[in-house]
């Protein structure tokens, strides 16, 4: 279709950003196709939305769900690139609360893929010093998935680089749940007390979010 952004899995595009400059003032905007993590950029927290996997698979004549598997295979490479740049965190927006509305067979495929990732891909990352943390609405996950992510969180707890995986995550749902939790405590409402009850408590705010697949939106 002439769009190189769809010629590879989502995580593959991210690595292409290895050879240019981040503009001095992030508020002025960022050329996503030309990012180089120099000394200043090493302090940034990068967020990544892996979008376009199904379209990539379709363009390659593969089953659409296989695009998710190929995207996952690029994750370890992406982590290595960000670590080499000197950053200490990578936030991956993997599965949103809205994604539960996808076809049951796709959701099931993604959950099985996540369990495999926790036992293989994330395990290798943990052995290399990566701490894996999951952020989101865990109650909606099956016992098998919860067990797998809790195991890898425990096994990787001593890592010096943190991979934050947003799973069953949505900003609105997070705020609603935080408000309910805060109400139960009877604490005075403030930014600080509210923040303590967010799913993302402890996770740094992203300075830069990259979304592959061609769409220019956050949701």
Image (cartoon, rainbow, N blue to C red):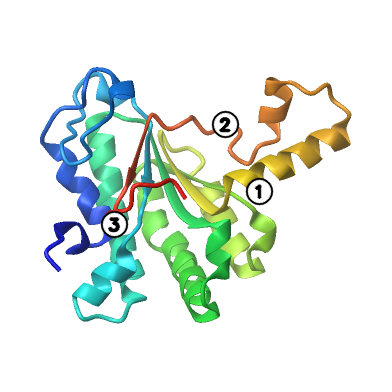
Alpha carbon separation for disc pair 3 and 2: 29 Å
Query: Closer to the camera: disc 3 or disc 2?
Result: 3
Residue that appears at 32% across and 30% down: 87
Residue 28, percent across and down?
28, 23
Query: Residue 205: x, y in percent?
Result: 48, 30
Q: Is residue 146 above or below residue 181?
A: below
Name the residue that disc number 1 marks.
173
Q: CA distance from mark 1 to mark 3?
A: 25 Å
Q: Could you give the CA–CA distance between mark 2 and mark 1, rounded to whole angstroms?
A: 18 Å
Q: Is residue 188 above or below residue 11?
A: above
Q: Secondary structure at mark 3?
A: loop
Q: Residue at x 22, y 55 (%)?
A: 12
Q: Residues within 10 Å of mark 1 (few under 14, many from 20)?
A: some
Could you say which is closer to the camera, residue 31 or residue 163?
31
Q: Which residue is mark 3?
A: 213
Question: Viewer-proximal residue, 158 or 178?
Answer: 178
**Disc 2 residue crowd, few under 14, some 14–19, many 20+, Cα 10 Å:** few
Badge 3: residue crowd in 10 Å (few <14, some 14–19, many ≥20) = many
Q: Tell me the residue that label 2 is attached to.
A: 202
- SS class, disc 1: helix
Q: Give percent across and percent down for residue 90.
A: 38, 39
């Amino acid at each position: 279709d002439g769009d190189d952004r769809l010629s590879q899995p989502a995580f593959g595009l991210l690595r292409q950003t290895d050879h240019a400059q981040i503009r001095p003032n992030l508020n002025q905007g960022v050329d996503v196709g030309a990012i180089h993590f120099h000394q200043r950029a090493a302090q940034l927290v990068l967020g990544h939305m892996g979008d376009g996997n199904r379209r990539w698979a379709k363009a390659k004549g593969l089953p659409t769900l296989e695009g998710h598997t190929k995207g996952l295979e690029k994750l370890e490479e992406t982590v290595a690139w960000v670590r080499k740049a000197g950053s200490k965190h990578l936030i991956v927006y993997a599965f949103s609360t809205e994604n539960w509305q996808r076809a049951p067979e796709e959701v099931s495929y993604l959950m099985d893929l996540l369990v495999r990732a926790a036992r293989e891909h994330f395990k290798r990352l943990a052995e290399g010093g990566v701490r894996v943390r999951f952020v989101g609405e865990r109650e909606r996950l099956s016992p098998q998935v919860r067990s797998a992510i809790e195991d890898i969180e425990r096994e990787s707890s001593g890592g010096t680089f943190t991979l934050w995986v947003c799973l069953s995550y949505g900003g609105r749902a997070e705020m609603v749940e935080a408000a309910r939790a805060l109400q139960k405590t009877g604490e005075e409402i403030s930014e600080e007390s509210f923040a303590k009850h967010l799913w993302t408590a402890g996770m740094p705010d992203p300075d830069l979010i990259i979304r592959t697949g061609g769409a220019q939106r956050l949701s």
